[in-house]
Structures are given as C-alpha cells and as structure tokens.
Image (tube, helix red, strand yellow):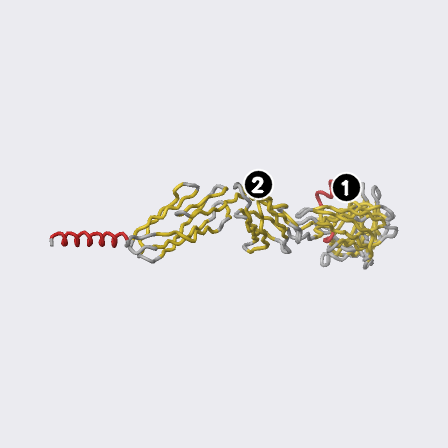
Amino acid sequence: MKRICNLLIVVLMLSLTVGAVGCAAKFEVSSLEVSPEVCLAGDTVMVSATLANTGNAVGDYVTELLVNDAMEETQTFTLEPGSSQSLSFTLMKDEPGRYAVQLGELTASFTVLGVSNLKVSPSRVEVDQPVTVTTDLQNAGETQATYHCCLVCQGKEVEAKDITVAGGLIEKVTFTLSQATSGMYKVELLGLSGSFKVLMPAEFKVVNLDIAPNPVKVGEETTITATIANIGEATGTYKATLLVDGLVHDTMDATLAGGARKPVSFKATKDSPGSYSIEIGEREATLKVIQPVRLETGTILVREGATGKGKLEVENQFDLDAVVVLCSVKEPEIPLLAFYVQSGDSERVGRIKRGTYVLYIALGEAWDEDSRKFSIDATYHRGKGEIEWEETERKRQQWNLTLDPAIVAVFYEPVSEDEFPKLG
C-alpha cells in the first residue's frame, strides 16, 4: 500500500513539472521597417516593428535596438499570452553614411546623404531672367541611393525631381527658376537656403535740360544737354530724342545702370533769329537765336508824352553800352523814355515833361532787337533816389548823368531782369 502511495506522488510531481514547462512566454519580433530609407543629415528616421508573445504565459521582453552594432536604445514590454505590441524608435544622424539597424534577429538599413555648397546664380536678375540653384548631394555609403529633391521658393514648392547618387560619389543637384515680379526671393533646397533679387525694370526720367550758350548768335553752334536718370534697378537703354519746334532734330542712345545718371549732349545751329522750342523727354526749354546789333548813340527806344522842356545828358564811361530808362514814380514798371548810349559816348535828350521819375540803367553787349535787351553780359540797375524836373517859362532844368563803375556802385542798386521795365 505504501509503495502505491509513493508511486502516485511521483506521477503527480511529473505532471506538475510538465504543466509548468508548457506555460512559458515566447516572444517574436517581426515586420521591421525603417522610414525613410534615404534621408539627409539631421533628418528624423523612424524604426518600427511588431513584438508578439506567442507563448501561453505572461512575460517581460527587453528590446535592444542596435545601430552599426552599437546599442542605441532599449525598451521593456510586458505582454499577455497571445498579445502583440507595436515597437517604435526615433533616430537622427548628422554624419553621411550607411547605417545598419538590428532589432532582435531582424536587420535593415538606411542611408544618410550629405548636402553642401548651395549656390544661387546670379544673385541679381531682371524680370523673367533665369536663376540657377545648385547644391552637392553626397552619398558616403557603399550602395546607390535615390532622394526626392524639392526646390522651394517663398515657402512654395516650385519643382521636384528624384536624384540617384552612386555609393561614394557626389551628385550635383540643379534647378532653374524665374520670377515675373521684382523683389527679394528666398529659395530652399535640401535643407539649405539662399536668396536672389529680381530688379525693378529700368525706368528713365529726364531730370535736367541745359542750353549753352543761350542766347546764341545766328549761325553759331550751341550745345543742348539733358541729364538722364535711371530710377529703376535694372540696366537699360534710353533713346533720347531732341525735338526742335516739335520736329525731330537728332536721337541718341544712352545705356544706364540702375540708379545711375548720365548726360546726353546734342549740337544745334540756327540760321534765323528767333525763339525755338527745345524738348527732350518731359523737359522743355527755349533756345534764343539772335542777330545782335549795336545801335547808334541817341537811338530812341521808347518815347511817351514828350511835351516838356527838361533835358537829360548822359555820359557813358563804361566799357559796355547802356540803355537809360525814365519811369514815373507812380508806375515804375512802365517806361516813358528809353535811349541808347554807346560805350565811351554821350547823349543829350530833351522834351522831358515836368515830374518825378525813377531812373533805370541796363548795361551790356550785343543788343537783340527781337527781345529788346542786351544778350551778352547784361546787368540791370535802379537809381536809389528820385529825379524831379521843374520848369517855368524862363527856366528849363537839365540833369547831367555820368555813368562809371564807382558812381553806379554808390548811387544805384542792382535789380533782376524781371524788375527792369520791359521795352517792348
């Protein structure tokens, strides 16, 4: 009986041992994936897999992620029998090359490509002019790799292409783009950025128009000069057209860089006296062509109300000819008497009516009959005091006037041409 009981105990223990062995946890790693398989230095790489407990007992499993045979990361999971767990790891590598990944018995790999030497050329372009963006894509691994390259301008994708780089080589990545609007543009390619500027189109303005000499004598040459300004940013060519009295006289091309100014000169000669309209672009001026004469001393230019008995004698000691003008104090802008006295000569003019007058003097050379003024070295003066003529039946007053630089400097004040009485 005792032998039977011992035999039953042995059988029961064997049964328990077999049951314990049959309840162990068993783990399997499957579906290893690396994404992306090709990336740039500094990009994020995801490693994923599935861990399953195929045994019939709860158990713990320590996952070990190896990169190039070096421990990268570990994670511990507790799984019920028959359950599974998604595994996820994040990698980032800054050095170009090929990286081997191992998780459990499974292996995979990814390639990190290097990027360098971004160039944007030219950096300043005109509207719609092409710009080339290039960079070097380096594959330090042993096998070829293909990468999807995107060119981004102002935050928007412009173009994309797949570039294949053989192991151990560098491939040039090239894109070309253009812009129809002026401004600064930022471009990005493979993590690097640069910029270029689209220049404002050339825009021209005539900022000055000069004629010298002016006036000019009949048959003599004058120079007409316009200053052209390019108020745009791009280089351009302006066709300057000289119009004389509305007709094309000459044209000339001027090429200017953005923001630059440049003078353009024309020559002109006229055979007839007169005033000629000069136009270049939006600028206008008047060319005065004269047939200068030298009037005889005593030539009367203006004579109004010559009914008096007063006299005025003028001696001109200047090296310039003179025109002497008398005006009423009440209306100093209206000449009542004007006469011509040559340099070094004298003249007496009579029949001056009793009254109070203002005296004006014009000095110069080359009298222009058309404009009724001196065309060369003209200056204008006004007496500081008033001249009063008195007369009776027995008395006829005479004023004697000497013109020389010292006297004029003391007793006369300079005036502008506009302040001088108009003689015609």
Q: Quadrant of the C terminus?
A: bottom right
Asked whether residue 65 appears in the rendered view, the answer is: yes
The foreground one among 236 and 88 is 88
For this view, does 110 lie left or right of residue 247?
left
Q: SS for tag 1? A: loop
Identify the residue at image location x=84%, y=52%.
Answer: 369
Q: Label 2: which residue?
A: 169
At label 1, the amino acid type is Asp
Label 1: few (<14), some (14–19) or many (≥20) C-alpha neighbours in 10 Å? some
Could you tell me which residue is drawn at 39 percent across and 53 percent down?
A: 87
Toward the viewer: 392 or 178? 178
Q: CA distance from mark 1 to mark 2?
A: 96 Å
Left or right of 75 on screen, residue 185: right
> Can residue 389 be seen in the rendering of this structure?
no
x, y percentage for residue 418?
Answer: 73, 53
| Disc 1 to disc 2: CB gap under 8 Å | no
Q: Residues within 10 Å of mark 2 (few under 14, many from 20)?
A: some
Kind of element beneath mark 2:
loop
Counting residues from the start of the chain, the first of labels 1 and 2 encountered is 2
- What's the residue at 57%, 40% (across, down)? 169
Which three-letter amino acid code belongs to the residue tagged 2?
A: Leu
* Residue 253 place in picture, x, y as percent: 77, 49
Judged by depth in the image, the label closer to the viewer, 1 or 2, is 2
Percent position (x, y) of residue 332? 73, 56
Query: In this rendering, is residue 247 above or below 227?
Result: below
For residue 73, the mark is none
Q: Nearer the viewer, residue 257 or 242?
A: 257
Q: Residue at x 45, y 52 (%)?
A: 33
Quarter of the rendering occupied by the N terminus = bottom left
Query: In the rendered image, which residue does mark 1 sit on?
Result: 404
Compared across the picture, whether 87 is left or right of 21 comes to right
Nearer to us in this view, 74 or 197: 74
